[in-house]
Image: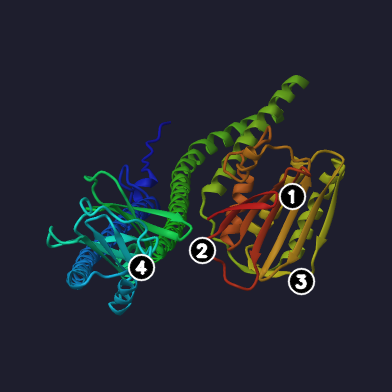
């Protein structure tokens, strides 16, 4: 007997993703990664821009300071020359006047002293051709210079605080060799000090935004440079500019620049962290969505595969039942007639009995396949579920006593629902039978029926469960069994009966206590659901497939 099975993979019914397509959550993560890279590049560009702005600003301010210093130095030079010229003119006129007075009548010490006081001079000294020196006041000069070698310009004595000029006698035939006049130079020294380069540098250093200004004597040729450093003043932008007077070092206050840069950096860090959190959160949402969607697709594929398998198996079972059951009936009738009409010895009778048992077992397998592949259409009527469970327990009491199995039953009263009595009786019978056959000797089985929230909960627990977790996950699958004889369709049929009534079957192994609990939940008040649940529970964790 050959059958042509037309089978189409259920995966063709669903849209398949493109080969090599990147998941949405990973694409979103890559997008935010690129966005983060762009933010980092932009932040680096902004930081570099701020640094260049600081350098440009520091160089501009330093060049302004340099210009101020150079202009002040020019003004200082002009002031010094003007003061010196005025002093020279004043002393020169005084020297000519004294020379004239001495030519009329030679002047003595007291007269020179009085004349110096009247003329606001520090002192007057006359050096005659004979070498005689007359001074008034006496010894106002530290030492008398040589008239022949002394320069014809203003001389300064910083220790005594005066300026003097030596004026040679206009006539070489006269008595005088030269006239030396002195003037109080305190104000001149004060002006020179205030207009000197150190005074200008000190004054500019006290301006707001400038930490210090220094001038170093170095070889020219260095390009202007700006460096940022932290010292006793705080953050300083140090600028070095080569000038005609040397290397000018200007330390500018960089606190506002540092504050601005830190503020911008903190803003970028905050934005980057926020961007990372948003990216990871959206990627997590997309991952969860795709994971849920993939789980739904796989569940639908499994459901379609089961339905396709059930349809194929149904067609095969119908053919097998039609083609095999009739020969089996004929074989069974022939063996029965042979046993009744023939004279057989004991060994032949045992052989015929074994052959009839094999035929009956084959017939029961076909019947189980028909039950599993035939769509269930329960005829629902009100029934008392507690009475149905007690009746099934009573039927299996002799078998339990024979195997020394103690059954502890806790059955609540008055639990009624709408259901098919025959199918629910088969459900309870399959679970009890499975528990008794899987139970070791000298043990017990716990049976309970309770009312939950809109559900009737039926539990059967037996110990001696020794399967591995991998084998436990296959419990309830069609054709999986650990018995020597059996098709593995008992729990599968039980599951289909529960689903047909809008309930679900839960298989809960406890590997610590070596127990297995089969739980059936059936709705009491609400209408049966089209989508059913099959749930496998490993200890306290549960995995549900729909």
Side of 61 where 407 appears, left or right? right
- Mark 3 secondary-structure assignment: loop
Residue at numbered disc 4: 203
- Mark 2 secondary-structure assignment: loop
Tell which circle, 3 or 2, labels the residue nearer the N-terminal end.
Answer: 3
Tell which circle, 4 or 1, labels the residue nearer the N-terminal end.
Answer: 4
Can residue 285 be seen? no
Residue at numbered disc 1: 432
Tell which circle, 2 or 4, labels the residue nearer the N-terminal end.
Answer: 4
> Percent position (x, y) of residue 302?
47, 48
Residue at numbered disc 3: 414
* Residue occupying image coordinates x 33% and y 51%: 15
Dividing the picture into quarters, in which one does residue 512 lie? top right
Dividing the picture into quarters, in which one does residue 174 lie? bottom left
Label 2: how many residues lie within 10 Å, few (<14), some (14-19) or many (20+)?
A: few
Side of 514 where 382 appears, left or right? left
For marks 3 and 2, give the CA distance: 26 Å
Of residue 190 and residue 315, the one placed in the foreground of this image is: 190
Q: Which mark is residue 530?
A: 2
For marks 3 and 1, give the CA distance: 21 Å
For marks 4 and 3, give the CA distance: 106 Å
* Residue occupying image coordinates x 34% and y 47%: 22
Label 3: how many residues lie within 10 Å, few (<14), some (14-19) or many (20+)?
A: few
For marks 2 and 1, give the CA distance: 26 Å
Of residue 340 and residue 16, the one placed in the foreground of this image is: 16
> Percent position (x, y) of residue 266?
43, 62
- Confirm or deny contact between disc 2 and disc 1 (CB under 8 A): no
């Amino acid at each position: 007997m050959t059958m042509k099975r037309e089978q189409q993979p259920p995966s063709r019914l669903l849209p398949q993703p493109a080969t090599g397509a990147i998941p949405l959550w990973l694409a979103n993560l890559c997008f935010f990664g690129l966005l983060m890279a762009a933010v980092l590049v932009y932040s680096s560009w902004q930081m570099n821009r701020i640094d260049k702005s600081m350098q440009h600003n520091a160089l501009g301010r330093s060049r302004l300071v340099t210009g101020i210093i150079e202009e002040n130095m020019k003004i200082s030079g002009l002031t010094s020359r003007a003061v010196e010229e005025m002093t020279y003119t004043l002393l020169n006129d005084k020297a000519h006047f004294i020379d004239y007075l001495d030519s009329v009548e030679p002047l003595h010490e007291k007269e020179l002293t009085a004349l110096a006081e009247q003329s606001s001079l520090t002192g007057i000294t006359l050096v005659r051709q004979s070498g005689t020196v007359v001074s008034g006041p006496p010894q106002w000069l530290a030492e008398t210079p040589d008239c022949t070698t002394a320069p014809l310009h203003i001389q300064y004595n910083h220790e005594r605080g005066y300026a003097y000029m030596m004026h040679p006698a206009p006539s070489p035939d006269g008595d005088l060799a030269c006239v030396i006049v002195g003037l109080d130079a305190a104000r001149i020294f004060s002006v020179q000090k205030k207009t000197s380069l150190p005074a200008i540098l000190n004054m500019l250093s006290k301006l707001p935004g400038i930490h210090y200004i220094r001038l170093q004597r170095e070889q020219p040729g260095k390009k202007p440079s700006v460096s940022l450093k932290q010292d006793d003043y705080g953050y300083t932008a140090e600028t070095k500019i080569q000038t005609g007077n040397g290397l000018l070092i200007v330390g500018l206050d960089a606190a506002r620049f540092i504050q601005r840069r830190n503020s911008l950096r903190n803003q970028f860090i905050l934005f980057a962290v926020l961007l990372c959190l948003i990216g990871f959160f959206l990627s997590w949402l997309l991952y969860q969505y795709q994971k849920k969607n993939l789980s739904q697709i796989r569940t639908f594929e499994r459901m379609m595969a089961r339905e396709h398998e059930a349809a194929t198996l149904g067609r095969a079972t119908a053919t097998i039942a039609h083609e095999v059951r009739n020969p089996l009936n004929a074989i069974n009738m022939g063996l029965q007639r042979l046993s009744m009409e023939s004279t057989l010895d004991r060994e032949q009778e045992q052989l015929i009995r074994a052959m009839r048992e094999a035929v009956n077992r084959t017939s029961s397998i076909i019947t189980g396949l028909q039950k599993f592949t035939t769509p269930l259409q329960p005829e629902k009527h009100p029934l008392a579920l507690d009475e149905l469970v007690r009746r099934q327990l009573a039927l299996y009491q002799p078998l339990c006593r024979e195997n020394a199995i103690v059954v502890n039953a806790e059955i609540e009263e008055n639990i009624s629902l709408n259901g098919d009595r025959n199918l629910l009786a088969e459900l309870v019978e399959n679970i009890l039978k499975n528990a008794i056959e899987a139970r070791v000797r000298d043990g017990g089985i716990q049976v309970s029926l309770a009312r939950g929230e809109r559900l009737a909960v039926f539990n059967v627990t037996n110990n001696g469960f020794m399967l591995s977790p991998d084998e436990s996950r296959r419990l309830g699958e069609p054709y999986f069994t650990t018995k020597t004889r059996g098709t593995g369709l008992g729990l599968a049929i039980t599951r289909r009966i529960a689903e047909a009534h809008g309930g679900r079957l839960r298989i809960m192994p406890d590997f610590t206590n070596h127990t297995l609990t089969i739980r059936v939940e059936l709705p009491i008040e609400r209408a049966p659901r089209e989508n059913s649940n099959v749930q496998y529970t490993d200890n306290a964790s549960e995995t549900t497939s729909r």
